[in-house]
Amino acid sequence: MEQASTIEATLQTYGEALYQSNPDKIRQAFHPTAKITGYLEGQLGEFTVDQLAEMVEKQVPSDQEKDLPRLFEILSTHQSGQTAMAVVRDQFMGMTFLDTLSLLEVDGQWVIYNKLFHVEG
């Protein structure tokens, strides 16, 4: 599998995690020490991967179980050696997010190392 395909697979795992409320897929897509940072209701929020996984797990029933359409768009990606960045639009907790993700290739596996999020209108 070429590099771009493996990066996209990691991004899709992240999107599936949100849609399915699957904390294991969050932990699969993210590096264990990743940071998740952005503004929610005007307040700066900083989260660990475990905190994000817990938030995802609490979204029951999942959007998939509610038969809602899945919103996950990869808007751009760029790779430089063993680093990459991606911008994705996704839906989580009834909000639409624009996420800027940095990724690293670690032991042959691409993982999200940092997530900056913006809640759209």
Image (spheres, rainbow, N blue to C red):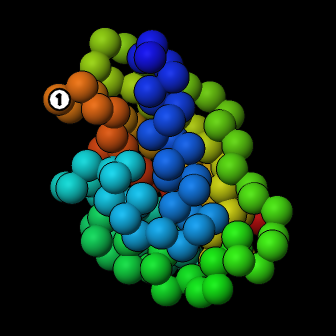
At label 1, which amino acid type do we have?
Asp
Residue 53 image-quadrant placement: bottom left
Secondary-structure class at tag 1: loop
In the image, 111 versus 25, the foreground residue is 25
Q: Say if 12 sits above or below 56 in the image.
A: above
How many numbered callouts?
1
In the image, 87 versus 57, the foreground residue is 57
> Is residue 54 in view?
yes
In the image, 97 versus 106, the foreground residue is 106
Residue 78 at what x, y percent from top left? 50, 20
Tell me the residue at 51%/61% (across/down). 17
- From the image, tell me which residue sits under label 1: 107
Left or right: where 74 falls relative to 34: right
Tell me the residue at 50%/52% (across/down). 14
Residue 67 image-quadrant placement: bottom right
In the image, 105 versus 39, the foreground residue is 105
